[in-house]
Structure formats: structure tokens, C-alpha cells
Image (spheres, rainbow, N blue to C red):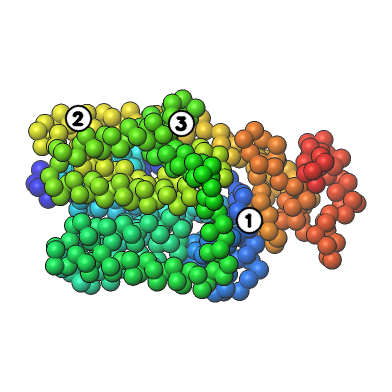
Amino acid sequence: MSETSRRRALIASPVVASAAYSFLVLLLPARGLTFFWDDWLHLARLAREPAPGRWLAPFQEHWEPLFFLLFDLEHGAFGANHTFFLATTWLIHVVNVFLLSRLLAARTGDERLAAIGAAAFGLTTTYREVLWWAELGAMALTFAIVVLGFLAFERARRGERRFLVLALVAVFTAPLGFSSGLALGPALAAEGWLLAPRERRTALALAPLGAWLLHLAVYALAAQGAPETVAHRLPQDASALGSALLLGSNAIGLGVVRRNFVPHVEDGVGSGAGLALAWFAAVVAVAPRLSPGGRRRLVLAQVFLLLLVAPIAATRHAMPPIAGAWSRYQYLPAIAWTSTLALALAPALRRAPRLVLSLAAGGLVALALAHAVAARDDERPFTPTARRPHLALLHRLEAAVRGAPGPVYDAPVSIRVGAFGERNAPVSRASDLLAVIAPETSASWTRERTPASLAPLEADPELAPLFAPGNR
């Protein structure tokens, strides 16, 4: 095999393998599901408000026009077919595996390490919520923008100025898809300071910070009141600060370490803080074995990881500590931990390439199988396992009010739809669901259901639990 063919095979293999794996393990089990939770709020907004206001208005403390634009385009193309929303996310995810392999190749200078790191990302299911929840397609898109920003900055540091412009565009754009994209600006500034030639160091450190500050300024103007909301969520006392540190340590210890490398172990076993300390101890132990450039890149990977985790910990500290390890928060950190993995393997690969590649292949197969089992057995609210009973009940309710089963689509009112009384799932009001699938059951001047319209549904023994006190 020629060197060119070998390189192409190394680039293609993790992409093809992860595409097949995520299709079989994540996408297929989620086919046929419908929207839930905030999806309905977003659909209601898109149905009610004119463009471009429906993309540009803030949502809670977030200002994410790219998020709403993608959701609107998907809704326009696919209507109510939730499966196609997930398929779009899956396609973006496959592209992300390829982009990540290019970034790892640039960071390590070795296609073999890039293939191992990209496969380690693509053959896991830690982030499965992203591929099971329609609205999180924007997080996959943000991942792509962030990696493209890193790749463009690699070229910019070599003196190609047009790529600096692309990197700065990525810094401004990444948070428009998902707020975690805010980590890109400071991360590129750190890269500029630590990796750029001395004569260009200051300029390459300040330019990303300038684009980042510009984004924050536009955010403050466009999302009136949202910055104040964020400020109120920050820790206000020592107890809140402790909760934030615990949540952040769980994001790394239980999220990055436990759920990626030992996915079959329950969260309650061991300490997230202890595993986070073990992670950074391993980083310190590996650093002396790397070249000076490799050590700087290793440090930068940890900086990016902390930049991702810190805002979540600071603004979500009131949540349960395990929230830091939630699946949705583990997608973007893959850029950091796969970079760490690839850099850590570099010295061993130089000494014993066949042994390292054989062990890596075996380890990836074992992890892929363990992650497939973990995804299959997951019963958290966003999973197909938890949502399928809700789907059957929802279709039965729709059949009762419409006379024929069919998919649920366009929400004319704001609504959160979850599983009704299912274990580990939120409870929604039946009247809210009816407002989506059967608005005719309410009087035109009110959102309340009329007793006469609800009576036939309450008489159905299978639907009666939906109308228990507090769930009407």
C-alpha cells in the first residue's frame, strides 16, 4: 500500500466505523420518537413569530440565532418527522468525527494518533443525548464550528492571514449555535500566546479575545436582561461556590473519565472529584515525556476543558451535582479529552508502534461494545427506553381526540411534553398536550379545557391517569 493510500485509509477508517456504529447504536433505536420538553417551546415560537425575529430573540438567558435557524430549516424541510431531525444531527456528527481527526492530526503530526482519537470519540455513546434530542442538533453544529475555528487558527499561526479571519468568524459564530461555543475565543487566545512565534504572540492572542468580546457586546445588546439573569445565577456565597466546584469536578471525573472509559459503572460508585484529580495527575505524569510543543498542547487541551466546564458549573450549581456529567455536556469536551489521549499515546507509539496500535484497536472494540450496552440500558428521560411508553400514550390520546392515530407536530402553544408518570421522567399536564394536538377542545377565549371536552377522555380507562389532580 502506498503512503497516500495508507493515509487515506487512516483518515477514512474512524469516520466510516463511527458512522456505522452511531447509526446502529444511536439513530436506529430513536426512530419514530416525537418531540419533547423544550422542543415544543421552540416549535411554538417558530410557528407564531415572523422571520428573522423568531431566530434573533433570546430564549431565557441564551441568545442562539443559529440554533433557531437550524431548527427552523429542519422544521421547514421535515415538518413533524422527528426522525429526520435526528438524522440531520447524525450527519453533522459524522462530519465532526472527520473534522476532529484533522484537528488531532494537526496537533500530533501523526495520522495514526488522529485515527485513534477520532475513533475513541466516534465509538462512544457518552454524548448520546445529542443524537436523541432534536434541539441538540445545534450542539453538533457548534462542535463543527469550534473545530473549524481551531483548524483555521493552526493555519493562521503559520502566517496565513486569511485563516485568521476565518478563525475570528468562528469565535463570534460558535456561541450562536450553543452557548458552550463561548469557550473557543479564550482557548484560541491561549493558543496564540503559547504556540505562536514570539513576534506575533501578542497579536494572535488579542485577536480572538477581540472577536469574543465583540460577541459578548452584541449579546448584551440583543438579549436584553439576559446578562443580568446569568449574573444572578453565579455563586453568591461559599456554599454555592462549593456546589459549583462539586458539579464541575463531576463533569470531568464522572463525565469525561467515568462515562467515556468505564461506562458500565454506576455514577454512585466512587468520587467525581477523585476521578477529576486522577485525570489531572495523569496529565502531569505524561507531560515530562512529551516534547516542549507537545507539553504546551497538552496544557492547552486542559485549558479548553476547563473553559467548557467552568461556565456550566458556575451557572448550574443549584442543580444536582451529577448534572455536570449529563450527556449533553459531554459532546464538546471530547475535543479536549481526545487531544489529551492522542498526545499521551505519542511517546509509546514511537517506541512500540505495533503493540500500541494493537492494544488501541482492542481497547476501542471493547469500549464500543460497553458503550452500546450502556446506551441500550439507559433509562433517563431523554432516552428511547423512557420515551417510547410516552409515545404510545401520546398517539392513543391523539386518536381519542382526532379519531385516527398520527404524528404530533407544530405546537401552537408553549408546552413541555414529557412522559406521563414514567419512572425518571417529568410529568406534563394533559391539558397542555391537548392544546397541541387538539386545540378545538378549548374555548377560543381561554387556554383552559372545558369539562365537556375532557369528559370522554377521562372516561377512557387508559387515559384516565392523565387527568389525575395536578396533571389536568
Which comes before the other along the chain, label 1 or label 2? 1
Describe residue 237's horizontal placement relative to residue 249 as left or right.
Answer: right
Residue 158 image position (x, y, % from top left): 15, 64
Residue 5 image position (x, y, % from top left): 14, 48
Describe residue 274's horizontal placement relative to residue 42 as left or right.
Answer: left
Residue 11 image position (x, y, % from top left): 22, 48
Q: Residue at x 78, y 51 (%)?
A: 431
Residue 430 image position (x, y, % from top left): 76, 47
Q: Residue at x 18, y 45 (%)?
A: 295
Q: Give, as a three-letter code, the residue at label 2.
A: Ser
- Give above or below for 466 relative to 363: below
Q: Residue at x 14, y 62 (%)?
A: 197
SS state under label 2: helix
Proximity of marks 3 and 2: CB atoms separated by less than 8 Å: no
Which numbered circle lies on residue 358? 2
- Give above or below for 203 relative to 243: below
The residue singled out by tag 1 in the image is: 40
User: Which image quarter: residue 215?
Assistant: bottom left
- Give above or below for 3 relative to 286: below
- Say which quadrant the N terminus sits in: top left
User: Which image quarter: residue 148?
Assistant: bottom left
Packing grade of label 2 (10 A; few <14, some 14-19, many >=20) is few
Which numbered circle lies on residue 374? 3
Q: Give, as a three-letter code, the residue at label 3.
A: Ala
User: Along the line of sight, which residue is nearer the eye, 256 or 415?
Assistant: 256
Disc 3/disc 2 C-alpha distance (Å): 24 Å
Can I make out residue 1 in this image?
Answer: yes
Disc 3/disc 1 C-alpha distance (Å): 28 Å
Disc 1/disc 2 C-alpha distance (Å): 47 Å
Q: How many marks?
A: 3
